[in-house]
């Protein structure tokens, strides 16, 4: 589906009527192009823009936060282990409906679009929802631990804060299953960051958001 003038008109109407970004995101009569770009922009603003600005201003390279080859397999394996309780919860709660990496609500529409945009669109999904969503936790974790260091090997302030933020950032309710889900998410994020701490490699976190979090 092509991005044309009619899409701009529809977008203007939606804006004047104060439609939310989420409503616009699900308007299937609008081209997938502006819907993906809008959603990607919002997602990057939440998980990517802040750390990118900080790294630029402080002249810090992304590689200084563990984007290296050394211990990459250890980082990924230990991250997968930390996500096992969450994976088990997804299966046991009946939420599993297929394994699809890089799944967001409009992934199927992106894939079904014309070949060129399909490739570019999925590259955006991988970058924003895969790389930056996982790497964002690494940078925040690193900054917190530099500000509030601890001598305890396993009690880690940065990991605690990031795990709690992850739980609070997503919808939840006070029910037995919701509490179980929050516990498994806490274990997953905490363990993911401990894998980074022990190995010095951040690819495990990126792997988790590419092939586990946004795939189940």
Image (cartoon, grey):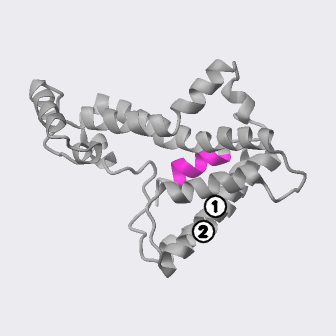
Gap in angstroms between the C-alphas marked 1 and 2: 6 Å
For residue 69, say whether it is visible: yes
Q: Work out whether residue 161 or residue 92 is closer to the camera in this orientation and state it.
A: 161
In the current view of this chain or complex, which residue is farthest to the right?
Answer: 151
Discs 1, 2 touching: Cβ within 8 Å: yes
Which residue shows up at 54% across the image and 49% down it?
A: 209
> Which residue shows up at 64% across the image and 51% down it?
162
Q: Is residue 94 above or below residue 7?
A: below
The residue drawn where x is 47% and y is 53% is: 214
Residue tagged 1? 188
Tell whether 170 sits left or right of 71: left
Q: Which residues are magenta?
A: 204-212
Task: State the residue lying farthest toward the bottom.
Answer: 176
Q: Say left or right for 16 vs 132.
A: left
| Residue at image location 42% in from the left, 34% down from the top | 124
Q: For the residue labelled by badge 1, is the local secondary structure a helix, a strand or a loop? A: helix
What is the secondary structure assignment of the residue under circle 2?
A: helix
What label sits on residue 184 in the rendered view? 2
| Mark 2 crowd level (few <14, some 14–19, many ≥20, 10 Å Cα) | many
Badge 1: how crowded within 10 Å, few (<14), some, or many (20+)?
Answer: many
Q: Position of residue 189 (x, y in %)?
A: 64, 56
Quadrant of the snapshot with the N terminus: top left
Is residue 136 a member of the stretch shown in magenta?
no
């Amino acid at each position: 589906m092509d991005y044309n003038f009619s899409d701009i008109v529809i977008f203007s109407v939606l804006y004047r009527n104060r439609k939310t970004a989420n409503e616009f995101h699900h308007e299937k009569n609008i081209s997938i192009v502006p819907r993906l770009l809008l959603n990607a922009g919002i997602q990057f603003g939440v998980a990517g823009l802040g750390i990118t600005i900080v790294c630029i201003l402080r002249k810090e390279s992304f590689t200084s936060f563990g984007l290296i080859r050394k211990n990459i397999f250890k980082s990924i394996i230990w991250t997968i282990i930390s996500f096992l309780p969450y994976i088990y919860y997804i299966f046991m709660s009946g939420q599993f409906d297929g394994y699809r990496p890089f799944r967001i609500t409009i992934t199927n529409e992106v894939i079904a679009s014309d070949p060129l945009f399909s490739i570019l669109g999925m590259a955006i999904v991988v970058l924003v929802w895969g790389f930056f969503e996982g790497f964002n936790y690494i940078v925040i974790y690193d900054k917190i631990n530099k500000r509030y260091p601890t001598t305890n090997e396993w009690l880690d302030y940065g990991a605690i804060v990031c795990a709690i933020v992850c739980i609070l950032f997503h919808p939840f309710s006070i029910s037995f299953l919701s509490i179980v889900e929050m516990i498994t998410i806490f274990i997953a994020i905490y363990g993911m960051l401990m894998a980074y701490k022990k190995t010095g490699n951040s690819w495990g976190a990126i792997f988790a958001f590419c092939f586990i979090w946004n795939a189940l």
